[in-house]
Amino acid sequence: MYLKTQGLVLREVAYKDADKLLTVLTRDYGKMTLKARGVRRAGSPLKAPCQLLACGEFTIFEYRGMSTVNEAETIELFPELRQDLELLSLGTYFAQVAEVLSQEDCPTPELLSLTLNALYALARLNRPQPLVKAVFELRAACQAGYTPDLEGCQSCGNPTPELFDLSLGCLECSGCPKGEGIHMPLTPGVLAAMRHITDCPPGKLFSFTLPREELTMLSGITEGYLSTQLERSFSTLDFYKSLFLTPGT
């Protein structure tokens, strides 16, 4: 039996002499592990759509107990990302998060769309990297069931408190009782951006601006929140951040 679906390659691993094992987030079947036979040979028609961060339409069949790519057509390769190490590493981080949040036989078209839109924002919209990163992290957390409570301070109800609790996902005033988790400072502008990311339609996700200092603050909060809720770190994020370290630091 043949299946046909659109998907994004989240990970690729060399397999045997000329094959690859691909982790693909598909629109119709969730996360799938696919074997691309002969894709590493010169001239393989599968080479372009079966590479990391490629979006394509895949025709899949069962071969010797494995889901195998029979045909694939390229939809988008995001060439701009492949020409810039920072953009490529950030896009690879998005792919690793999507892999963690997706499941086999459980379609998550919203996650696929979010990841594709984030890659497009990096490649074509010229949006600041911290902004795209923050949007992806917070919206992905919401899609995974970790929507934070951003209405007001959990103790007094103040709509513009100064702290965000990474563990509880809630707002707190500096003078109110607090839990034992990590509390990160935030400005009214950062709080407004977080509310925008959690509530706006998908087409408006990247349509806000913040000064550089507040973008850095926002990115730190969303990064900390996602990793805290998932209780894990990401090697791709560590690599991305290492690109900004100067020698000797």
Image: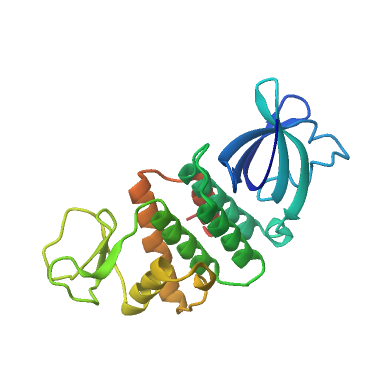
* Residue depicted at 33% across the width and 73% down the height: 191
Q: Position of residue 107 (x, y in %)?
A: 52, 45
Left or right of 196 on screen, residue 158: left
Which quarter of the image is occupied by the N terminus?
A: top right
Q: How many marks?
A: 0
137 over 100 or under it: above or below: below
Residue at the top extreme, as displayed = 64
| Residue 108 position within the rendered picture, expressed as x and y whole percent measured from the top left | 51, 49
Query: Which x, y percent locates residue 240?
Result: 54, 54
Q: Quadrant of residue 221?
A: bottom left
Q: Confirm whether residue 29 shows in the render.
A: yes
User: Which scheme is used to colour this image of the protein?
Assistant: rainbow
Report whether 233 appears left or right of 28: left
Residue at x-position 40% and y-position 55%: 141
Q: Position of residue 140 (x, y in %)?
A: 45, 56
Question: Which residue occupies 47% across, 65% down?
Answer: 135
Q: With 117 as the anchor, is 57 left or right in this view?
A: right
Instruction: Mark yes or no: residue 242 visible.
Output: no
In the rendered view, does 178 fall on the left or right side of 66?
Answer: left
In this rendering, the answer to whether 8 lies above or below 187 is above
Quarter of the image where one finds residue 115: bottom right
In the displayed orientation, state which residue is furthest to the front: 1
Q: Name the residue furthest right.
A: 43
The residue at 50%/62% (across/down) is 133
